[in-house]
Amino acid sequence: MKTPFERLRSLISSLPAAKIDALLITKPTNWYYLTGFSGESGALVVSRKGSTLVTDGRFIAQGRVETSGVRIHEQKGALFESVGQFLKVSHSRRVGFDPSQVTVGQLQSLEKEAGTRVRWIPAAGKVESLRMRKDRGELAQMRRAAILAGEVVEQAIGLLKPGIREFEVGAEIEYQMRKKGASGPAFETIVAFGERAALPHARPTAKRLRKNELVVLDLGAILGHYCSDITRTVYLGRAPKRIRSWYQAVLEAQAAAIAAAKNGAACGDVDRAARQVLTGYHFDHLFVHSTGHGLGLEVHEDPRVARGQKRPLEPGNVITIEPGVYSEGIGGIRIEDDVAVHADRTEVLTRAPRDLIEI
Ligand code: GLY
Ligand code: MN
């Protein structure tokens, strides 16, 4: 199990190759990963000479309690002005930042306050690439988050009856998560009945469930900072032949992708495994998104499990496998589970039944 100190050390050892003296971290999940600081406002400056958390008065005490070996610098005034002023008097000359996480306005404040002696160097995804390989402690936490999500999806299936509204099911799902210790949902819970199941990211509405409708439930919990993500599709009544064939195709596509998700396999090959099964059923045109995504402190993180992705899976990667088919005016079917890649096996973390449930 890695300590934040070891993670910081790995990051610092990657700075010289990028020709930077310091790296500015502005994303909460990244500074949590590196230091254990769970406050939502601040910035972390990582350098070989030590790391400094710049944050405001609300988080100073919390920063001291949650971190060790990190200096805490109290922000005076606006955050990015404070960070710029701090860097102006530091010894860092080439400071990396992630252009996908710092706005143009924030960069302007940094440049103005830090002055011309500091050069700002784009350095994307450095912490995210460390975060892809989960250690033992992270995997243990992700197992718990995944099991929680499986329990909640099963409870939610138990609530389905004619007349219930999408938002009632969504609210119950999020309530049950919190009762089981989650700090909240990992994303807005998706509950889609009937035709609305054709929208892969349907938001719960006042729609009531009727007999002979599909139900897509897609939910995830944040437990101990780590996310889970599970989808199950059920049918209220006896499913017609077309729905059964879609379901069977998606189930087989998912099994093929899980089997392909091995240490060393390219992420694009995992995506292709799912797509090939759906092509065999002539349903590939109904599969309108990618097969999965990395999962961890964020619900969507690297690696991407999508067409053409060459990145090989490595031990410690946790990804979702979630093929689906969608047809406007009829509905949709998705089955999603979370898997962890190990050196010699692939572990499915989510544990709810996957066969078609007809209620
Ligand atoms: N389960 C929601 C998503 O992956 O976008
Ligand atoms: Mn997902």
Image: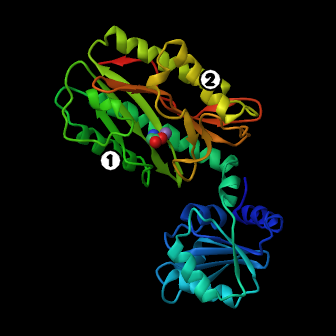
Q: Which residue is mark 2?
A: 273
Give the SS element for disc 2: helix
Dot 1 crowding, Cα within 10 Å, few <14, some 14–19, many 20+: some
Q: Going 36% across and 15% down the picture, which residue do you hit? A: 243
Location of residue 347 in the rendering, given as x and y in whole percent from the top left corner: 64, 31
Q: Is residue 37 visible?
A: yes
CA distance for labels 2 and 1: 36 Å
- The quarter of the displayed image where residue 304 is located: top right
Q: Is residue 178 left or right of residue 262?
A: left
Tag 1: amino acid: Tyr
Name the one closer to the observer, 226 or 64: 226
Q: Going 75% across and 82% down the picture, which residue do you hit? A: 92
Give the SS element for disc 1: helix
Give the vertical position of 127 relative to 329 (above or below).
below
For residue 156, the mark is none
Q: Is residue 184 left or right of residue 107?
A: left
Q: Is residue 208 left or right of residue 353?
A: left
Give the vertical position of 206 relative to 101 (above or below).
above
- Sequence-wise first label, 2 or 1: 1
Q: Going 72% across and 52% down the picture, which residue do you hit? A: 1
Tag 2: amino acid: Ala
Residue contact between numbered discs 2 and 1, judged by CB atoms under 8 Å: no
- Which mark's residue is nearer the viewer, 2 or 1? 2
Q: Going 76% across and 86% down the picture, which residue do you hit? A: 91
Q: Which residue is mark 1?
A: 175
Dot 2 crowding, Cα within 10 Å, few <14, some 14–19, many 20+: many
Location of residue 97 in the rendering, given as x and y in whole percent from the top left corner: 65, 69
Location of residue 237 in the rendering, given as x and y in whole percent from the top left corner: 26, 15
